[in-house]
Amino acid sequence: MAHDEPSKSAVQTKLVIRNIGLLLSGDLTNPILDADTVVAIGDRIAAVGKEKDIDTSGATVTIDAKCTALAPGLIDSHVHPVCGDWTPRQNQLGWIDSYLHGGVTTMVSAGEVHTPGRPKDIVGLKAMAIFAQRVFQAFRPGGVKIYAGAPILEHGMVEDDFKELAAAGVKILGEVGLGSVKDGKTAHQMVSWARKYGIQSTIHTGGPSIPGSSLIDKDMVLETDADVIGHVNGGHTALPDNQITALCESSTRALEIVHNGNERAGLLALRTAMELKQLHRVILGTDSPAGSGVQPLGMVRMIALLSSLGEIPAEVAICLATGNTAKMRNLDCGLIAPGREASFVLMDKAQHSAGKNLLDSIQKGDLPGISMIIIDGVISAHRSRNTPPATVVPEVVNR
């Protein structure tokens, strides 16, 4: 069957999305584009602009956005997948597909740490990471892309282990601190080895989240110098305020704010990053599934929370969940621009929201109504089964 794939991919589709009322780019430097049409050929964006200036002929699928908003698909920077679309933390099936209906088109694993009987010996943890990377590369519920295979650091790992993992396709580490490595010196050495071979790292921040984990304070975070300061607002228990502000001030790494953390601490991290003029470092995730459950609308809830209580424009909050994460995690999605991955969310203000329009409704704390999700140029879902209903929904006018 594998030999049939090239012939399938050779058939190029052309998707045209026209009559867009609000085009949210995902780019913090220019979050709203003066454009009303997007064209995708295959799985890539080919053109963005005014319909009169773009070649829309020969479309295989045309979508009339009905003057609603188009944004990049949301990126959940912090998930804990295990086996397919099942999570043992809540014994729940179909959680990834449910996140799709919350606008999430891409997920990044922070470690498959909830796997029952997770191996902690070096051979076993490497085998599990390679297995998870392969499985989730091939298995995409609803089309969602899951970047997984994130090994948890354990004592005894040497440089060649990271070289071997990278050669096998592993590109991310699980949260530093969830395994036996809990001192900054050892963690820094392993993170450096990982970085040498192109593997990105994330560190647990705050109090323990699962049995076997422990407090990771700002001193260990700074000494380790991982690429992403995972859940800077705690997962679940946050560090003291002065340690959170110190992490913002003393590090240049990504500041990840998550749904399953301390909300007040998340707002503190956001405001500190704004004061430092380093909002580009802020990325968003859910840190789920976890003890608090599965949150299909966790990403849009974070956008509404940070916009309404953090007092940042809604279009900026959306950038934190899209382009910022894509740039910090070296992903090809998250921005609406030619050459980027053609993954989008179409949405409008929820029916009967007090907001005047989509952005105003989010600024007031309401969730948007998601009306269509597109991944790699293909419609993955129509009106969301999880968000409140959108006031206006797009229409497919030809296939």
Image (cartoon, helix red, strand yellow):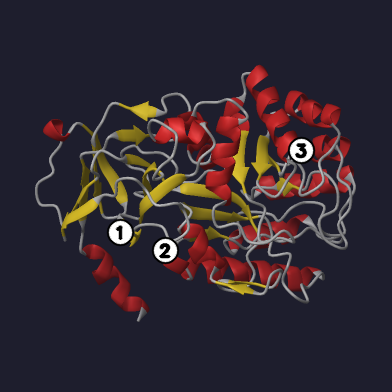
**Which amino acid does the dot numbered 3 rest on?**
Asp
Mark 2 Cα shell of 10 Å, populated few (<14), some (14-19), many (≥20):
many
- Identify the disc placed on residue 225: 3
Q: CA distance from mark 2 to mark 1?
A: 9 Å
> Residue 374, position in %: x, y?
35, 54
377 left or right of 63 in image: right
In terms of sequence position, does the residue under pointer 3 or pointer 2 come before the other? 2
- Pointer 2 residue: 143
- For the point 20% across and 55% down, the residue is 396
Q: Give residue 74's position: percent from left, percent from top.
A: 48, 47
* Eye-nearest disc, 3 or 2: 2
Q: Can see residue 276? A: no
User: Picture coordinates of residue 103 (x, y %)?
Assistant: 45, 52
Q: 269 left or right of 308?
A: right
Q: Secondary structure at mark 2?
A: helix
What residue would you read off at disc 1?
378
Image quarter in which the C terminus is found: bottom left
Q: Residue furthest bottom?
A: 1
Q: CA distance from mark 3 to mark 1?
A: 39 Å
Amino acid of disc 1 = Val
Helix, strand or loop at mark 1: strand
Question: In what element is the residue under mark 3?
Answer: loop
